[in-house]
Image: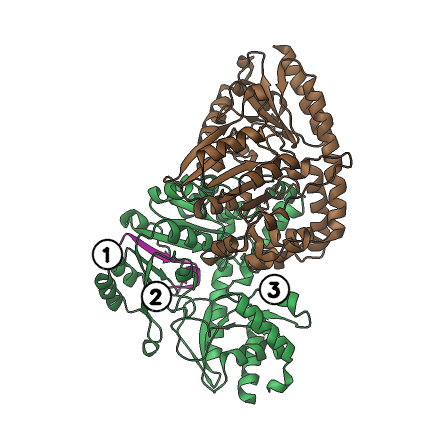
Chain colours: A green, B brown
Amino acid sequence: MNSELSIDVVNKIKTLKSDSGTHSPSIDTILNECPELKIGVDACFLSNPYATDLFMKCLHEDLIDNNKLRDVLEFYPPQNREVAKYISKAINVDYKKIFVGNGAIEIIQGILHNFVAKKICIISPTFSSYYEFVKDDIEIVYFPLLKEEEYLLDPKKYVDFIKKEKPDTIAIINPNNPNGGYLKQEDFLYILSSLREVTNVIIDESFIHFAYEDIELSQITSEELTDTYSNLIIVKSMSKDFGIAGLRAGYAVMNADKVDKLLKNGYLWNVSGLTNYFFKVYSEKEFIDKYDIERKKYIMNTLMFLNELKNIPGIKVYPSRANFALVEIENGMTSFDFTISLLIKYGIYVRDCSDKIGLDGQFVRIASRSFEENLLIIKAMKELLCEK
Amino acid sequence: MNSELSIDVVNKIKTLKSDSGTHSPSIDTILNECPELKIGVDACFLSNPYATDLFMKCLHEDLIDNNKLRDVLEFYPPQNREVAKYISKAINVDYKKIFVGNGAIEIIQGILHNFVAKKICIISPTFSSYYEFVKDDIEIVYFPLLKEEEYLLDPKKYVDFIKKEKPDTIAIINPNNPNGGYLKQEDFLYILSSLREVTNVIIDESFIHFAYEDIELSQITSEELTDTYSNLIIVKSMSKDFGIAGLRAGYAVMNADKVDKLLKNGYLWNVSGLTNYFFKVYSEKEFIDKYDIERKKYIMNTLMFLNELKNIPGIKVYPSRANFALVEIENGMTSFDFTISLLIKYGIYVRDCSDKIGLDGQFVRIASRSFEENLLIIKAMKELLCEK
C-alpha cells in the first residue's frame, strides 16, 4: 500500500509533525506545506461542529450583517475582570473567582508557572502541556493509567498514590484526553474530600459538556465546589464544546486570591474583542438554551459513532465519555501508516498518538464530527482495515 | 459647569477608572455602565483608523464575502513558530528570532517574567505595564524625563545613568507613551553601542510607524540591529499602526535562544485564527504597499492635528512623533474635569493622565483620529477651554 502514497507528502508530514512537538500540526500548516492534499474531515480536531454553526449564526446576526464587526476588531477589548463578569452571569460564580484565558492553554501555563511550588502529579497518558509547561525546577511524578484497566482512573489507587507521593499540585482532565475516560461526580467528590491537604487541585473540564450521568444528558457542573474546596481550580476550554478553537477562549474558577495573584502582574487584555463577544453571548440564556439542544444532538451523534467504531475489525476502542475515541490498531499496521493512509487516500486527518507518553501500542485518537463526516470516517476505516 | 454634568455618570466613571488600575476603562466597559452616554470619538485610543478601513476591506474580500470566516474561528490556529514565518517574510528576519504575541502586552509580560534577573531601569513617565508587570523580587530604578526638557530623553544622561545604576534590563518606548517623544536612530545607535554590557535592552517600537526622519516619511526599522546587538529585544504592537487592537497581535524580535526559552514551556497557540490571518496579510507586499499610503496619510493628518492643538489657548502641547499628544491643562482645570467634560458634553473620550507616574501637573493624552474626528476634537477643546 505504501507504494501508492506520495513519498514526498509522507516526508513533509513527518517533518511537520516533528516541528509541532507533541501536538499535531494544524490543517492550515499542513496545507501550506502540502497544497496537493485534500483534507475533507479534520477528525484530529475535538470540537462540536453544530455549536460552531450556532455561533456563526449569532455572529452574523449580531456583528456581520449590520457592520458592527469593525468595532470589535478596532478597539481594545475590556480587561480580564470585565470579561469575567459575563462568565460570572453564565455560571453563577462570583467574578472575582474567575480568571479569563486566551484559550485554556494560557490558563494551564499561568497556573503551572505561578502556583506549583515543588512537585506536581500528572496522570499518564494525558494532554502533554500539563507536563511540558512545567518549569525546570519542579519535580513531576506520573500516575499511570493502565492498559489492563482500559486507561480508566481508579479513585482509590489515585488517592493512595497522592498521599504517598505528597505533591503540592495535582492535575486531572475529566474526561481525560486522549482516551475520554470519565471520572464520575461521586468519585471526583471522593478525591476532593480525601485530598484537602494538596495545595492545588487542577481539574480540567474542557470536555465535560460531552459527558453525562443521566438519561436526560444533563450538563455536569462542578464550579460551586470551589466554595467548599478552596484548593480546587477548574479549568475550562470553550474550544471544544462551543466549536470555536480559532477564537481562543477559556476560563478558570479558583480561589479569589489566586485570581488576584495572576492579574497582579499580567493578563491585562489577554482576550480578543471577538472572544469578549463570545462570552457576552455565553452569558445570555437564549443562546445557552439553543446551545444545549446542539450539545445533546452531538452527544447522541457521538454515541452512535463510538458504537459503529466498535464494530470495525482489527481495532480496539477504549471507553470514552468525551467527543472522541482512543483507538488501538491491532492488525499490525503502525499508527503512523494508519494516519497517513487515512489522510492521503481519504482526506481524513486523525491524531497519531505515537508521541503520547503512557500508551503502550499503536494508538490513534479519532474525533466525532458531524453525522455525515462520521459516516465518511467509518466507511474509510472499514475499507482501510479490511483491505490489509 | 459641574452642575451641568450628571453626578451619577461622574461617579460611575470614577469607579470604573479606579477598577481599571493605571489604564482607561474601554468604551465597551463605559457604555455598559453608563448607557446614557454617547461616545462619538475615542481619542483615548491610539490607532490609525485608515489602516482599520484597509484591514476590514481585506477581511471582507478574503473571508467574509466568501464565507471562509468560519474556518478561521472553528479550527485551531497554527503554533507560534508557524505564525512567525509570516512575520519573517514581512520583515526579512529569521523566524527563529521572532516571538509572536497576543498583543505586545503579552510579550512585555513574557520578557519581564522570564528574562529580568535582578534590576530593571524604566523611563518615567512611560507605559505602566513596564513597571506593573515586574515581579515582586525585582528592583526597579526610574530614569526621570524632565518637564524642563519637555519630557525628551537625553541619550548621554541616560547612558551615564545606566552605567552608574547597572541594571540587567532596560526598557525604552520609542516614540514614548504618553508624550510621543522620539529618539532619533542616531541616538538609539549611540545608546546600543554604549550599553553592550546590559543583558536585555528592550525597545518598544509600537508607535514607530508614526515616526519619520526624512520628508518621504520613510518607515523606520531597527529589526536588523538584533544581528549586531544580541542583547536587543524589539517589541512591536500591531494594534496602533494597523488599527486592530481588538484582534490582539504583536511580535518581538530577539536572540533565537530567548525565543526558544519562551516557547519551551508556553505560548503554544497564543494567537487567534484571525490574528494569524492578519499576519498572513501583513506578509503580502500588495497589502503593505496599500498600508504605506494610509500610514503616510495618517501621519500628515496627525501633523495638522498637532499644529492645531498648539494654537488652542490654555494648554501646552509637548513634542510628539507619535499619533498622539501629551497636553498640559494650564488654565486651572483639573485633568479629570477636563476629561469628563469632553466626554459628557461632546462625546469625546481622552486619556486623563493623573495616574501616570512622572508627570507633574494636569495632563491628558489625546490621540489623533480621522480628519473629521480631529476637527471635532479641536472644536470641542476650543469651546471648552474658552468657555472657562
Q: Earlier in the sequence, mark 3 or mark 2?
A: 3
Amino acid type, residue under disc 2 in the picture: Ile
Q: Picture quarter containing residue B70? A: bottom right
Question: Residue, x 57% and y 71% (percent of image)?
Answer: A15
**What span is in magenta?**
A197-216
Per the image, label 3 sits on a secondary structure element best described as: helix
Query: What distance separates the C-alpha of mark 1 from that of mark 2?
Result: 19 Å
Which numbered marker is on residue A60? none
The amino acid type of the residue labelled 3 equals Thr
Residue B320 % position (x, y): 64, 28
Residue A22, x across and y down, in percent: 48, 67
Whether residue B24 appears in this view of the structure is no
Which quadrant of the structure image shows residue A358? bottom left
Mark 1, Cα crowd under 10 Å, few <14 / some 14-19 / many 20+, is: few
From the viewer's side, name the closer residue of A215 and A149. A149
Residue B343 at x, y = what percent?
Answer: 58, 24
Q: Position of residue B89 (x, y in %)?
A: 67, 55
Q: Main secondary structure of the magenta part?
A: loop
Q: Chain of mark 1?
A: A
**Residue that carries the numbered disc 2 in the rendered image:** A123
Number of numbered discs overlaid on the protein picture? 3
First in sequence: mark 1 or mark 2? 2
Q: Which numbered circle lies on residue A29?
A: 3
Q: Residues within 10 Å of mark 3 (few under 14, many from 20)?
A: some
Residue A67 part of the magenta segment: no
Label placed on residue A193: 1
